[in-house]
Image: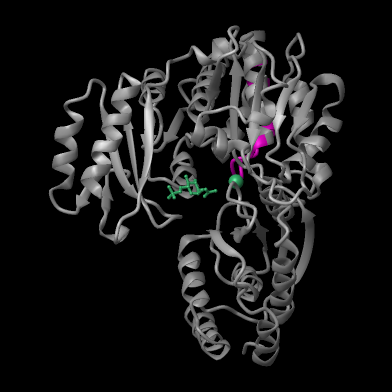
Amino acid sequence: GLPVASIKELSEKHPKPSDIKFTYGTAGFRTLVGILAGLRSKKLDGKTIGVMVTASHNPEQDNGVKLVDPRGEMLESSWESHATTLSNASSTDEFISALEAFVRDAKIDLSKPARVVYAMDTRPSGPALVSALEDGLRAIGADGRNAGVTTTPILHYLVRAINTKGTAEAYGDDSEDGYYTKLTNAFKKLSAKPTPSPLLIDCANGVGANAAKKLAEYLGDTFSLVLENTSITAPGALNNACGADFVKTTQKLPSSLSNIIKPGQRGCSLDGDADRLMYFHLDDRGQFRMLDGDKIAALVAAFIVELVKAAGLDESIKVGVVQTAYANGASTKYLAERLPVKCVSTGVKHLHHAAEHYDVGVYFEANGHGTVLFSPDTLAKLADYQPSTPAQSTAVEHLVNLTQLINQTVGDALSDMLLVEVVLAHKAYGGLEWDSLYVDLPNRLVKVVVADRHIFKTVDAERRLTSPVGLQDKIDSLVGKYEGGRSFVRPSGTEDVVRVYAEAVVKSQADELAFRVAGLVY
Ligand code: 16G
Ligand code: ZN
């Protein structure tokens, strides 16, 4: 049975802290995380599970934890709901009986080994959460490996690398060195002349600053990175008026960069755990232009489609794109003219799973989180392919190198950044040419505080409401009055609000539509 006495003692050492607001992932519990990760590992016959302590793009005082499954993917959702139930236990005794019931129902063999690798971002509350996690691991007898302070995507990489070590699917050496070496070797092979001009990187004053610095060392003089917002120890600086979420939500340049960026220059922002990426550039007149996840998807997907065709593989390798309802309508139109596009509900999990159904699945949220997945079949096809011309051979080589450059476990700001730079170099695009692929439709996002957000029920990838009854009809008739109008309402999964998105051909009309729909919701 469970080592009840030790779980009890160690749990009581870590009462729920009142000064930390948990917002992210399967949050709300402390010692439990270690125990749960250990149990998950036992259930999967000792495969290594990951735990990341981070609250991503959220304010510095927030924190949370996220479990990572053996292939580097997010924790299976049935376990997420168990975690939530367990975390709601009101006393240690209640917690232990819930845990015993769970071990019985999930048929977990406690005699199996358990292995867990964990990391944290730069938040001041990280060490306390890690020590609770370590006590949880100790309580369940799991073997822990501390990966230190690192990015979320690097932790995902490590999980996959550890679990595939010595197999045919080996993902890379299971170390940070392995990660940087894999990415930068692929980048160097994909480099085109001339080398790209220096890239400005807004590190959000977070862990991405450390990682970008190391990346720059591995890149050497093949590509120079100019790092800004790297104050990882300044209190309150993390994600504050900078970073990918700030850029996306305000559609502005962080003021800390305004004296640094020059007209015609491009730059990008990472979020607090470096799994989101926003690009931007100043045009010749010094006007700020944002290049978001949709623009990245358009650039990357079109490039991969071209390579597959150039390789002579377009009959056997099908490329597809996955977006959410937040994708700008102009991006969807651009993409749909070139390849199949699927819309799914918000949340990385939904995008990732839908992308797995394509031979090559490109997915990006407008907020800058995304990656590209190559199916096992596709990897085998690329490896075995006999090209019949030098042009085909080059294209296949590029595709193989892309499979190494791209972190396929999860969206990765640094890997995505290298990917964008490769495509820009190959297409000889600057920020302006990239930005001109399509023109964003003006849009507006509003949040509405309502008495009970759970009465809002959606269908059709969150694009239509079925409850409250009658509301969707009212939205439809409003939308019909606006040229190029589109709007949807969905309850947030992370905040106690309802979100309203609207798009129209003219900015003032998008604003007006958003506020009128919000008026219907309120
Ligand atoms: C989280 C998700 C993001 C999603 C957002 C939606 C991850 C890594 N991130 O930030 O994908 O877009 O939540 O939040 O899972 P909302 O439901 O409050 O709109
Ligand atoms: Zn993040």
Q: Is residue 152 above or below residue 422?
A: below
Residue 307 image offset from top left, x and y in percent: 57, 17
Q: Nearer the viewer, residue 1 or 26?
A: 26
Q: Position of residue 426 (x, y in %)?
A: 65, 13
Q: Residue at x 81, y 36 (%)?
A: 213
Residue drawn at 51 percent across, 77 percent down: 86
Residue 401 belongs to the span the image colors magenta:
yes
Q: Is residue 10 above or below residue 424?
A: below
Q: Nearer the viewer, residue 401 or 504?
A: 504
Report if residue 272 is visible in the image. Answer: yes
Where's residue 303, x and y in %? 55, 18
Give the residue at x 45% y 65%: 78
Report the magenta residues as a range. Answer: 394-413
Residue at point 58%, 11% (across, down) = 283
In front of the other: 69 or 502: 502
Q: Quadrant of residue 454?
A: bottom left
Quadrant hosting residue 480: top left
Q: Is residue 219 magenta?
A: no
As displayed, is residue 474 above or below residue 321?
below
